[in-house]
Image (spheres, grey):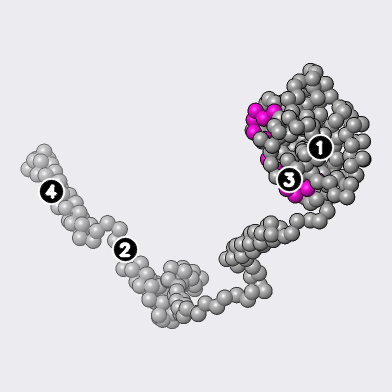
Amino acid sequence: MSTGTILAIAIPVIVVLGAVVAFVSLRRRDATGLGHLSRETRRRDELAASAGDDAAASDDAGAFGVSAEAQELERAVAAERRPSPVAIAEPELPQDWAPPPSDEVGVTRRQFLNRSSVLLMATGLGTFNAAMLAFLWPRPTGGFGSKIKIGTVASVDEAISSSTPAENFSYFSEAQSYIQPYPTDSATLSNAEAVYGGAVLEGMRLGYVALWQVCPHLGCKVPVCGSSQWFECPCHGSKYNRVGEKKSGPAPRGMDRFPVTIEGGNVFVDTGKVSQGPAIGTDSTGQGLEGPHCA
């Protein structure tokens, strides 16, 4: 046979044999799977995982030629991998609640609110009772609010005639009043009797009228205007004649007044009995404007 014939036969045979060897190798790899460990490696892992018998593991490891240091390292790694036991604490039984000592807690919010409510209620009731007692208490026997002696008839007349800034306008601070002379002629008294009455009218018959210094509009003190000879309130411009009868302004009535009495030659003003001033339009004396206004 020639060389060419031999090569033609040998080459296909070699190719076929190579294919068979490759096929057998692939089948073996498929049977074992990827990542297959050797028998020795699997043996060492089983010994390390069991960790039950260190002597047996040492003998087997020695059989495979592993040093004592490697064995110690493997045992340490196996001990770290082994899960540590978890201690489960026994559940504690619930305890009965007891309030803390009062000296540690102090005043609680509930106690504070309760005590505050009681204190406010007691304060309100106490204030109301005090006001009731003050209302029912007898009037004072001296000072404003009682019957006040302002002087003798002579001294009062002297004060009226020498008053400033206008004559016939005398102020007595103890009674908070202007003591004004009232004409005692029959025509003027007849006009007064048609408007006034009671103790105020009796004082007019004696020749006096006591006018409270307070303006009946909003309570300002009413001064005297020397030029007009009227009372003129500087707050809102209410104006009254010499005997306190309203002439103009926002006041709802004339000036309020007190009863005047004469006892034993002494003149008394009863500041505990206030009589409202006369209605708007009252003009018992006919006194007109005597000069320019002050307010």
Marking on residue 199: 3
Q: Earlier in the sequence, mark 4 or mark 2?
A: 4
Q: Amino acid at mark 4?
A: Val
Q: Earlier in the sequence, mark 3 or mark 4?
A: 4
Q: Nearer the viewer, mark 1 or mark 2?
A: 1
Image quadrant where residue 242 sits: top right
Q: Residue at coordinates 83% horizontally, 53% vertically from top-left?
A: 142
Image quadrant where residue 157 sits: top right
Q: What is the secondary structure assignment of the residue under circle 3?
A: helix
User: Which residue, given by chain and number where applicable, does mark 1 sit on?
Assistant: 207
Image quadrant where residue 107 sits: bottom right
Q: What is the secondary structure assignment of the residue under circle 4?
A: helix
Q: Residue at coordinates 7% horizontally, 43% vertically from top-left?
A: 1
Q: CA distance from mark 3 to mark 1?
A: 13 Å
Magenta region: which residues?
Answer: 269-283
Q: CA distance from mark 4 to mark 2?
A: 32 Å
